[in-house]
Image (cartoon, helix red, strand yellow):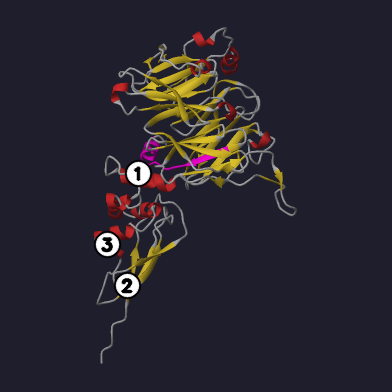
Amino acid sequence: MLGTAPPVKKRVCLPSLEGAPPSSRLRRVEGRRGRRTRCPSPETPSSSFQHERTEDVTAERPGACIQDLPPEIMEVILGHLSPCDVMSFGATCARYHQQNSVPWVWKSFCSRMPGPSEPSDWQRLAILKHTQALHTQRLGPAQRGSPGTRSRRSQPPTSRAMELPEAHGYRRVVPAWGSVLLWDYQGTLHLLRHDGAEGLLSQPNVLCHNVKDFAVDPRNDARHRDHVYVLANPQDVSQGTSRVTFYGLGTGAPVFRMTFHPSLAFAQICLTGTKIHRQLLLLSGTGAVYGLSLNEANMLLRWHNFSVHMTRKIMSVPQGPLSIRQVQSSQNSALYLSGDGTVCLEVYSPALYKKMFGDQQVCPALQPPVHLPLPTKVVKCSLGPSHICLVDERGGIFTQGDNSFGQLGTGDRVDRRQLTQVSVSMRPVDVWCGPNHTLVLLQDESGAKELHGCGFGAAGRLPGHPKGSDVLVKLNVLVPRASRSICAVKNCLYIMSSHDIDEALFDNGHN
């Protein structure tokens, strides 16, 4: 009598998952016959070898695996996963990468959100929604640890701020006096109230919609940031293509508005100076920069319409005029980044001009912006009160200016009159220049991020290094994996998390 043929052992090689984020989890996948098969998660790193699994294939029903599921069933299964799991699943092979691009799969993640203009935006919005977060860490003198611990000094842990379910991905965060301004990718500016000792407490308020950009007082002390200039599109097209509204953060109500000619369409706004001698820098869509001088104290007292004069700033290098792409500002200077990666610095104070370039200028405001030569293209920049930090397309970090506290990270405390490269072992993601210290957000090959800093370390400005450092050192800060930007005020550090797939593809083209 013949018996039943024993099951045949078949070895199947799964495709490589190069580029997927690391994880040690295993997933259970339902087979067609209801049998659960343990298979490696798509998040498991496997850049140097192929994963293998062994499955039982009977003579009656050979080849029962997840590849046999119809596309319609796969879409239903993917709809129950998180955006991170769907992205990891699509990284396994070209077939699944094409299948997880179905708009319906991503639309299910953001079903409570208003629809975008194009169906392809569903994936971007879902990932932005899933990765958005704002983390804060209190800065202050280091505290004594408990007896018996290895570290005698410890910093307060990083805490997650209040969630904004209605936000569509965090784009920019700016701390202000008694509040935090948060701008999302939908063009909505949110105002979050907070308490100085307990962190963010109250529910967020929507300050304005259709926002192109916004700016507060450029000084690092948040006490000066009690008003905000908001550049937005007016609802009435007859009022022009750009409008600047001056809001008081205490009440959240508009104080005055400025409208421009319809031919002037601005994309960015920056502030320099103080309330009495305020200058607005407006960047147009064509790359031109216009300056506008105001006296905020007088503006708050006037309740009638009046006109102001704008002047266009000339940006040029020996090769010809420049088309500006980004503007950074401080109290006494402005940094201009062109589309081809050229950087120019404009200084308004004689003392600052001497610190930056070593020459004494009686009236530097009348001088044209100074070109900062660099052989490579600059992709990111930050401007502090007396020093600058640039990041080029190769991942190099360059600093220049005042180095009294070692904030340039050059290993000494000698001022630099020219751009000097700072050595780093990881790829920079973001840089931020404080009053006398510098913070750098770095990412290693696995995608993990660390926060490094140099300069003045007292009052907790460099967590874990109260004595400061003249080179970049790792700070005692827990950095989330999706972090993309950093900023700080005197008593708090802000880490914003958000992942934009469009910007990620752009950044990969430069690194």
User: Which residue range is magenta in the image?
Assistant: 493-509
Return the residue nearer the eye: 126 or 346: 126
Instruction: Assign a secondary structure to mark 2.
Output: loop
Spatial CA distance of label 2 from label 3 is 14 Å
Instruction: Assign a secondary structure to mark 3.
Output: helix
- Tell me the kind of residue under disc 3: Ile
**Percent coordinates x, y for residue 416 in the rendering:** 59, 21
Q: Which sits earlier in the primary sequence, circle 1 or circle 3?
A: 3
In which quadrant of the rendered image does the N terminus lie? bottom left
Magenta stretch contains residue 237: no
**Percent coordinates x, y for residue 483 in the rendering:** 48, 42
Q: Which residue is mark 2?
A: 34
Spatial CA distance of label 1 from label 3 is 23 Å
Q: Which sits earlier in the primary sequence, circle 2 or circle 3?
A: 2
- The picture quadrant where one finds residue 86 is bottom left
Spatial CA distance of label 2 from label 1 is 34 Å
Q: Which residue is mark 1?
A: 124
Q: Can residue 313 be seen here?
A: no
